[in-house]
Image (tube, grey):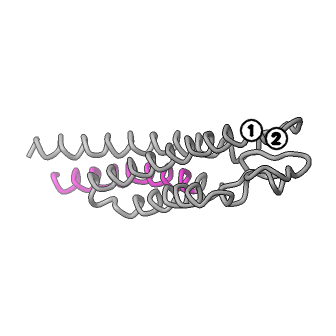
Amino acid sequence: MTDNRLVIFAKNLRMIQRIQSIFLFLASGAAFGLFGLPFAKTDTSVANSTIFADGLYTISDNVALLALFAGAGALSLIAIFLFKNRKTQLLIGRLSLVANLIGLILAVILFMQDKDTLGAVNPSDGLGLYLPIIFFVFGVLAQRAIGKDEKLVNSMDRLR
C-alpha cells in the first residue's frame, strides 16, 4: 500500500513540475521574442535620434538591453532543467526576473532620454513593449509553482 502511495505522489510531483516548466518556457519565449519585435516604431526614421535612427526601437539598439534580455531568457531556460534542485531553480528564476526588470527600466530610461530628439514624430507602441511584462507574469507564476512544490516536499519530509 505504501508503494502505491509513493507512485501516486511521484506522479503528482511530476505534474507540479510540468506546470512550472511551462511557465518558465513561456517566460523565456517572451524574452527571446524581443529579438524580433520592437518596443516602439515611428513612421519615418529620425536622423539625430540614437534609438529611432532606423524607425524602430529594438533591443539591438543598446548592448546592455541585448545582454539583459538574452540573459533573462537563458536563465529561464536553464531553470527548467534544474528541477531536481528547487532552491537553485528558485534562485535562477529570481535572477531572470531581476534581469528582466532591469532591462525594462533601462529601456524606459533610454526612451525618455531620446524623446527630446524626436521632435514632432510620435512613436507608436510595438508588441515588444509588452513582452517584458508577459515575461514577468510567467516568471512570477513559475516562482509560485516552484515554491508550492518545495513546500509540498518539505511537508512530506516532516511526515516521515
Residue 44 belongs to the span the image colors magenta:
no
Give the residue at x 38% y 47%. Answer: 94
In the image, residue 118 sits, relative to residue 86, either above or below, namely: above
Range of residues picked out in magenta: 1-28
The secondary structure that dominates the magenta segment is helix
In the picture provided, is 82 more to the left or to the right than 38?
Answer: left
In this rendering, the count of numbered labels is 2
In the image, residue 144 sits, relative to residue 20, either above or below, namely: above
Q: Which residue is mark 2?
A: 118
In the picture provided, is 40 more to the left or to the right than 105?
Answer: right
Q: Are marks 2 and 1 in contact (CB under 8 Å)?
A: yes
Q: Secondary structure at mark 2?
A: loop
Q: Secondary structure at mark 1?
A: helix
- Residue 2, image x, y percentages: 15, 52
Q: Nearer the viewer, residue 65 or 133?
A: 65
Q: What amino acid type is highlighted by mark number 1?
A: Lys
